[in-house]
Amino acid sequence: MAEVSDVFKTTSNSEEAENASNINSGDNGIQRRLSFSSEKDISTLDTCDVSTLQSVPDNSSSCLPSADIVEQLSPQARSLPDSNVTASKQHGDTEDSDAEVVRRAQEEGCVNVVFPGTVTQEGCCRFVSEILKCILYQRQQLPMTYDQLVYSQKKQQASMPVKSADMDWRKCQQTLQELEEVLQQLEVLFSLSRVPRVLLLLGGSLILPKELYEINMEALVLAGGDQCLRVSSCLRQLFRTLFVADLLSDTRPVRLMSTTVLVLAHRDCGVGWFRPKLQFKVPARVKNKVIALSTDPSTFEEPRAEGSEWQDYVWFQAPMTIKGFSN
Amino acid sequence: MEGDRMEVGNQKENINVEVHVKSHSTAKLSEVRMHVLALLNRHSMVFGNYRWTEFDEDFLQNHVQSVAIVDLEEMVTQPLDLKSCSVSVHIFTLNEDGPSTLSLEDDEELSAANHWLLPAAEFHGIWESLVYESGVKSQLLDYVTTTIYFSDKNVDSNLISWNRVVLLHGPPGTGKTSLCKALAQKLSIRLSSRYSYGQFVEINSHSLFSKWFSESGKLVTKMFQKIQQLIDDKDALVFVLIDEVESLTAARNACQAGTEPSDAIRVVNSVLTQLDQIKRHSNVVILTTSNVTEKIDLAFVDRADIKQYIGPPSEKGIYNIYLSCLEELMKCQIIYPRQQLFTMFELKTMGFAKSEVSEHSLNLRNIALKSKGLSGRALRKLPFLAHALFVKSPTVTLERFLEAMDQAVDKQKEEKANLVNGV
């Protein structure tokens, strides 16, 4: 961790200036949504210590890269600092230029994230669960980010006796429980099988959802152990690209919908919670948005996975949907 | 129809076998088919409809809920040799998620239609529970099968016209809506080799009337556009159920008397033109039900290919309904101990002779005779009423229960009479 933050500090000053304007335009929408209501000042970059923040979320001098805002809960004031530019700039040479990312997202509904190395299976699971949380929040199915909700829910529970009659509280609790269950079971599934694709269906039915998001991990090269990239840095790169691409924001208000999670996994993986959907076909007439994660081919020499590799993979559907709620 | 084929003898009879695969199974269809065929090979002699739920083989035990030979004529006197028949195996899994809703406008909370993926767990078993005069169910099944067959063969619909519209009419409580659901379920299983899945859309017709004058016609068009989206998927067989269709297609000449606003005419016109649009597609069937046929616009009635009257059940039907109810109660051990009841066919072959074993069955037949005139819905709740009003103990013998049912029938008839007098 210390290493990572060192990199930030050394590269920050020079890189920040030239990228700030470019990123700001793309990040405006996110900045609005991700800024929290507390009044605290945004601290400057040089007081930011990434490693301590990640281990001690209650640190009061706060300033986090965007990915960590989504994944971590902390009550302090946080607005999107420009530090995310520097955080991911180290991968800059392997990525498309930001303008290209935005263009692809707008025209093709596709965001490519190319990691400069291999990742672990647990990493994939983290990516999926963080994207799921992010989409639920950005598509206005949750009033706050998941982690914030969990925190405030806990705080509420601690400060006063539970009013079980409170409908809002119960609804929130139910959504959180559903989401938590799905996230847990995703972990189980990822431990049983390789998962090349994940679909998130919002609203409508399985055949005709209102919105469809695909996380494609077919081109990710998995490995175990030490030679893999750190999950946190991958997440940072992933969310930076997502926010730059502005894939998830929509100015129109979105109705509350239920979200269904479908995962492609091996036929014989023996997962019990998810229900196999052998007949399921990815809805073709719905405009889907794809988040494609891949490993940079130049960093990995072994021959690429062929299409036939996924022949024995079938769709599994989470038996419960996540119902959105607002308060 | 099946009977005719049997008498011809030489012609191979088509036997339908439905294989219900467990919802957690990930076995390949080809593998399931192979094992089922092997099972049928081992047990190739069958008497009428039969359902296996226990298997001597691990694979089937693990992956398959039931294997059933279905929809043979009831009166099979000689055993059937499956080896001399052409056997079609239909493999399906039930969709366990409930209905999703289709709404017409984005900000509208009220749903305009409920939407099921077939085969749905909710509809499972309805087909078997419906008892009609012989032939009603198989005719409907054959009608839709022919529809699809004609479309497949590219019959010119300008020369031979068929509209894919079924109208079921009859008194309330005879199971018209249930029959529509069951028919859709059945067909989605039967045609699973051709269409990968079925969809069932139940339109809430009241939601198609707008508070704005002249908007209702547009809402109908919007609804059908949604359905069109579903139809565009050529892999899906789409069933559209318009329940109580008279509310959408009220006779237009009533408007001339000034009792209906002209907006209602627009709705009828809109429905008619949309139906004509939709019939061009080969993968859609429109099912409609109605209690009051005389109120329906003639142009709509004319478009329905099959206008099937669904009446109150006959004595035999009533007997079968009661029989299935009592079987269920014995299964749940509310009636205990379990006692043998004969089917109507078995009773007939015995010449309704009174004996110790047939006593209960004959009693039941008398109750059935007495219940004539009650609707299917009333019959299905009768065992419940009997238990609630006259049994008053958790478990009961069959004899005592039959007495209670007898009393319940009397009470039902009395209530019905009072209701009529009161009006």
Image (cartoon, coloured by chain):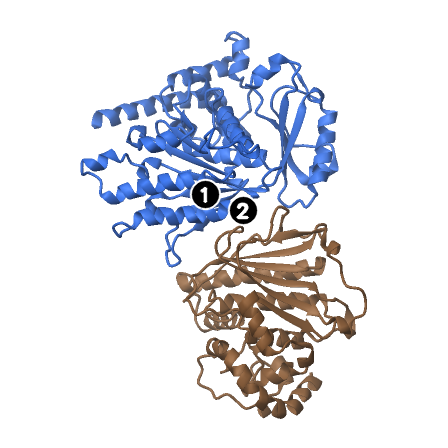
Chain colours: A brown, B blue
Residue nearer the viewer, A31 or A41: A31
Residue at mark 2 shares a chain with residue at mark 1: yes
* Tag 2 residue: B233
- Reply above or below: A220 against B143: below
Residue at image point 37% right, 26% down = B375
- Reply above or below: B150 against A39: above
Answer left or right for B285 relative to A89: left
Residue B409: image location, x then y, percent: 37, 22
Amino acid type of the residue tagged 2 in the rendering? Asp
Gap in Å between the C-alphas at discs 2 and 1? Answer: 15 Å
Q: Residue furthest right?
A: A302
- Reply above or below: A53 against B410: below
Marked residue chain, label 1:
B
Residue B114: image location, x then y, percent: 44, 46
Mark 2: which secondary structure? loop
* 2 or 1: tag closer to the N-terminus: 1
- Reply above or below: A149 against B356: below
Of circles 2 and 1, the one toward us is 2
Residue at image point 52% right, 36% down = B185
Residue B221: image location, x then y, percent: 37, 47
* Tag 1 residue: B201
Q: Which mark is residue B175?
A: none
Residue nearer the viewer, B211 or B95: B211
